[in-house]
Amino acid sequence: MRILFWMIFTAAAFVSMHAQELPREWVDPDTGHRIVRLSDDPGSSSFYFHQNGYTGSGDKLIFSTPKGLSTFNFNTKAIEQIVEGRAGSVVVGRKTRKVFYIKGDTVYETDVDTKATREIVKNAKLRTGSGFGLNADETLLAGSMIVGEMPQEFRPQPAATPAPTPNPNAPVGQVPARDNYPGKGDMMERRLAAKIPMTLYTINIKTGEVKTFHPATDWLNHVQMSPTDPTLIMFCHEGPWHKVDRIWTIRTDGSDLRKIHTRTMDMEIAGHEFFGQDGKHIYYDLQTPKSQVFWLAEYDIKTGKMQKYGMEKREWSVHFGVSPDGKSFLGDGGGPNSVARGDNGQWIYLFKPESGKFKSEKLVNLAKHDYSLEPNATFTPDGKWIVFRSNMLGPTHIYAVEIAQSKK
């Protein structure tokens, strides 16, 4: 017993000491931009890139830790735990200041200030690909789920080699959000061909009523909701991008199904779609064809017109984002095994559109980041910082880089 106690104490002391050794703040010598570490616990993680983690006023960031969910207060710099235990499918309400999530088979809401928690749906047995969609007036959650049981062959299996830090925002049963892992391509092909019955659903936050609609045998995933239109949902047909018509919108009553992008050539791919913060546009990674010509596409929801912003191959990023004012964009770079392999830029980028192309600025050198963990960068609500997760210093932590260059 004494030996066991000593081992536990030594391990805890080592973790604590290692965390203290990591710098809290520094200026990237390659870019001149200030970086601040926002998390204390190794293994902390921000959410998937299109899952809102900020309060509407921008005073707090909600994030996952090995212990549960915590908040970072940008004004006081204080970190506070608000939910104990693993929480999946997390999204934060900008208006209500509540965080919505799944624990086990129950859907909850928790006030980010008071920690008051309420059960929305018990024993729901819901699964959603990358997190809940939350509508503009914060009355509905949305997601996609399998009808019946997931076939055994598509359930997560123990990795043959140590896997990178998993996404703590991922619900049980979700394949880890990794840019590249052994067997992923084969799994995607088999899962697409399996034609497993699925459906979209909404949850009435007040009453807990679950409504299903749009039954399909397509692989439905990445459900998002417009930040301004309470009835507009975006979702994707998951699978190898060159084989699926990926990006779709639909109304919460199942009407007005629309395909957003139509392929114009063989091996053209479009994906990692997200809403602009004003709700007027949908943005997505576009390659014509795959791994050769790179764009960020902007689709006007009202008119259906598309504009493209070109970029260099090295500027391609796993995920992109748009600033609150819609004038700037970000990219979180790509690793050696990413789609632009052979010429990837491992940086956090800031992009400015100029004559149909992106003019880039490097903010953070991610040469030491293992891209099996996606950075999932996002703009803060004031547009002054970019928040991302990284293992560039060893353990996974949450960092913020200041967009304005530091004065030397």
Image: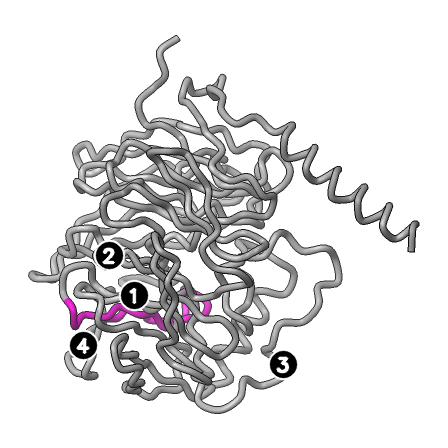
Seen in the image, is 362 located left or right of residue 205? right
Callout 4 touching callout 2 (CB < 8 Å): no
Taking the magenta stretch, the answer to whether it contains residue 246 is: yes
Which residue type does callout 3 highlight? Glu
Q: Secondary structure at mark 3?
A: helix
**Disc 4 crowd, CA 10 A, few/some/many (<14, 14-19, 20+):** some
Give the x, y percent position of residue 310: 28, 41
Q: What is the span of residues highlighted in magenta in the rendered image? A: 230-249
Residue 13 visible? The answer is: yes
Of the pair 98 and 147, the residue shown nearer to us: 98
Is residue 256 part of the magenta span, yes or no?
Answer: no
From the viewer's side, name the closer residue of 261 and 163.
163
Asked whether the beta carbons under mark 2 and mark 3 sit within 8 Å of each other, the answer is no
CA separation in Å, label 3 and label 4? 33 Å
The dot on residue 312 is: none
Mark closest to the chain's N terminus, 3 or 4: 3
Q: Earlier in the sequence, mark 2 or mark 1?
A: 1
Relative to 342, say whether 92 is above or below. below
Check disc 2 and report the residue beneath it.
275
Residue to which mark 4 is pinned: 251
Label 2–label 1 contact, CB within 8 A: yes
